[in-house]
Image (spheres, helix red, strand yellow):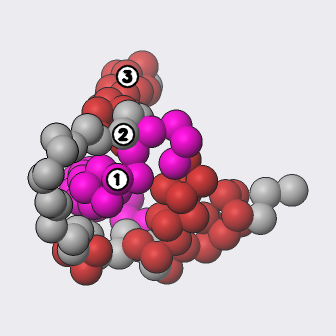
């Protein structure tokens, strides 16, 4: 049981590191540089799959889109949270509605 808990904690920490690396700070773009528009369709929708690999792939794609879209930094938390809805489906979208948007 302790091994399973350690593994889950490690996976959770990996996801947090991914988020911190890509969206905890605002992307600094040199003057004169033009960014391509981020492809939101490339992210796909996360449906709540229990496979860690599915969650990790989806989250990696999402945080890169947020970073390129200049949604990084603590002052953009609200935009990040609200924009996440469009990238969810099924059970994940239901969980989001109940635990993020409609928290009582």
Name the residue carrying label 3.
6
Name the residue carrying label 2.
26
User: Which numbered disc, 2 or 3, marks the residue closer to the eye?
Assistant: 2
Q: Is residue 56 visible?
A: yes
Name the residue carrying label 1.
70
Residue depicted at 40% across the width and 52% down the height: 71
Residue 19 percent location from the top left of the image:
36, 40
Mark 1 to mark 3 CA distance (whole Å): 34 Å
Q: Earlier in the sequence, mark 2 or mark 3?
A: 3
Mark 2 to mark 1 CA distance (whole Å): 6 Å
Residue depicted at 41% across the width and 35% down the height: 24
Residue 75 percent location from the top left of the image:
55, 42
Is residue 33 shown left or right of residue 80? left
Q: Quadrant of residue 4?
A: top left
What type of secondary structure mainly makes up the magenta span? helix
User: Which numbered disc, 1 or 3, marks the residue closer to the eye?
Assistant: 1
Residue lying at the far right of the rendered structure: 104
Mark 2 to mark 3 CA distance (whole Å): 32 Å
Decide: is 48 above or below 16: below
Residue lying at the far front of the rendered structure: 32
């Amino acid at each position: 049981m302790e091994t399973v808990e350690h593994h889950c904690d490690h996976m959770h920490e990996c996801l947090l590191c991914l988020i911190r690396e890509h969206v905890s700070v605002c992307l600094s773009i040199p003057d004169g540089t033009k960014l391509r528009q981020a492809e939101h369709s490339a992210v796909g929708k996360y449906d709540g799959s229990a496979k860690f690999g599915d969650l990790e792939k989806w989250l990696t794609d999402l945080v890169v889109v947020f970073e390129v879209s200049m949604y990084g930094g603590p002052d953009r938390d609200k935009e990040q949270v609200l924009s996440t809805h469009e990238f969810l489906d099924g059970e994940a979208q239901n969980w989001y509605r109940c635990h993020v948007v409609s928290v009582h």
